[in-house]
Amino acid sequence: MNITRLGVTAITLAAVGALALSGCAGGASAPASTPNPGAIISTNGSEPQNPLIPTATTETGGGKIVNSIFAGLVYYDAEGAAVNDVAAAITTDDNTTYTIKIKPGLSFSDGQVLTSNSFVDAWQYGALLSNAQLGSSFFSDIAGYSVEQDSPLTGLTVVDDTTFTVALTAPLADFPQRLGYAAFYPLPASAFADMAAFGESPIGNGPYMLDGPKAWKHNEKIDLVVNPAYDGGRKPKNGGLSITFYANQGAAYSDLLANNLDVLDSIPDSAYGTYESDLGDRVVNQPAAILQAVTIPARLPHFSGEEGALRRRALSMAINREEITKIIFSGTRTPASDFTSPVLDGWSDTLRGADVLEFDAKAARKLWARADAISPWTGSFQIAYNADGGHQGWVDAASNSIKNTLGIDASGAPTPTFAQARTAIADRSIQTAFRSGWQADYPSLYNFLQPSYATRAGSNDGEYSNPEFDSLLARGSAEGDLAAANSDFQKAQEILLQDLPAIPLWYANVTGGVGLDVHGVVFGWDSVPLFTEITKG
């Protein structure tokens, strides 16, 4: 594997931080009969928020599909290590200018030739301000990027059909590690004629492709089949995927128990007390790079300035994380002590200010009273969430904890689907706090911090901005030494613990299950099954 001259650093970050994350259910044992290579694997999902354009996809519903139908320069294996996919080599002498060579003779699923321009044109489109792509901030380190006006990425240069160079604005030792994320996927030339239409029926270069122009039945399902043009390390051992968009996780679990679903990646909280006995050795329960939180935009009444800072701290200390993770989640969650994940290299549970994430009713009431002295509280505190994701139990429990501690009205505010919830969050029409969180794109502390909290970052749904935090992120990402980088990221987190743009709640395990006659099920470091490895029969 030739990723970069300093590739050992990037690989170590992935391997050390996520080595223990790959896991499998009982269904992963050797099959008693010969698997059917044409078997379609059924799994759960959610309606994508947006058309299936890689740079517009920053949520898990769309991500599960986009990551199956596209292939990037690298992909991440079960342990989170980067492996060359489309890339033949990624090299650098200074961590600032990278030369990328892609494998010759590759094509998209419809036969369009894949060249250097397939990447450069896609990245240019994703970065351009007027295209309003949610993943645009992933290109912010490339020369020419602008959030003020339309500006081409001047740091991208096509050398020939299989070679292009990337000039960054500052050294980034982990740049190659980032290139497996969806924003860096290529696009065929035909996509740019009508990007909206392309997003409804995308043409990719990954292990799967859409099963015809009507494969995506909105709010119902999407069907994928094997892409014969794919020639990388993720060649499917099955005939395709059928991803059902369930209205709630309970229905998905019922289908799993009835053997109408092959792989479920999220057990509903209502089944935590029984799922191990229900499924036996077909259970999946392992750590994953996932954080659950509640975001409170500063634009909401009572949540800006000194008053807002006091109320955020009070609310955080009014939530009994230990009790909720024990009773609601049956120990499948761990109370958070930072904004990242303990499965990552550099994670720490001794950050200055982390006591704000501990339940302390007396301190919470004092903080709330101090805020009331500035401006008396009015109204109800609500936490919005998507009802199709199995969140009602913990939202109700957190709301009751707040209500009982602070003596205010607090409740959940359900929205029917994930797509609807994300739309209200993204267009800033939501008028309450809301469920948030992060499932890592690549194994790094930086990936938990930059997209969600850096100024104007694509997933910064609370519109948080702190120049000191931004500066520490930039300094850390430019460090050549991983320990030094993580030290900067820890200091950046200590600023977040003071400002609390979001309130971290707990780290999640991936808790799922496998159907009968299903084998080779491995859940990766990011909690997503390695679908290409699954067999049935």
Image (tube, rainbow, N blue to C red):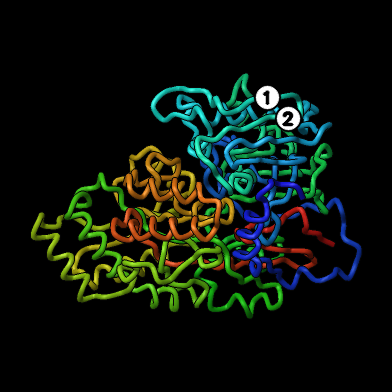
Which quadrant would residue 455 be assigned to in this image? top left
Secondary element type, mark 1: strand
Residue type pointed to by label 2: Thr
* Mark 2: secondary structure: strand
The answer to whether residue 44 is left or right of residue 486 is right
Residue at (60, 46) in percent of width and height: 178
Return the x and y of residue 167 as percentages of the image width and height. Answer: 58, 32
Residues at circles 1 and 2 in contact by the CB criterion of under 8 Å? yes
| Vertical comparison of 353 with 241: above or below | below
Residue marked by disc 2: 163
Q: Residue 524 in the image: x percent, y percent? A: 66, 60
Q: Residue 327's quadrant in the figure?
A: bottom left
> Along the line of sight, which residue is nearer the eye, 453 or 319?
453
Residue 250: tell me if it is visible: no
Residue marked by disc 1: 158
Quick one: label 2, few (<14), some, or many (20+) residues within 10 Å? many
Residue under the image location 57 percent in, 27 percent down: 124
- Can residue 385 be seen from the camera position used here? yes
Residue for point 55% across, 44% down: 172
Residue that protrudes farthest toward the top in the picture: 193
Residue at (42% x, 54% y) in the render: 436
- Classify mark 1: residues with Cα within 10 Å, few (<14), some (14-19) or many (20+): some
Name the residue type under label 1: Val
Mark with earlier residue (1, 2) = 1
- Give residue 354's position: percent from left, percent from top: 34, 68
Position of 481 with respect to 396 (left or right) is: right
Closest to the observer: 211 or 77?
Answer: 77
| 441 vs 269: above or below | above
Q: Is residue 295 above or below residue 400?
A: above
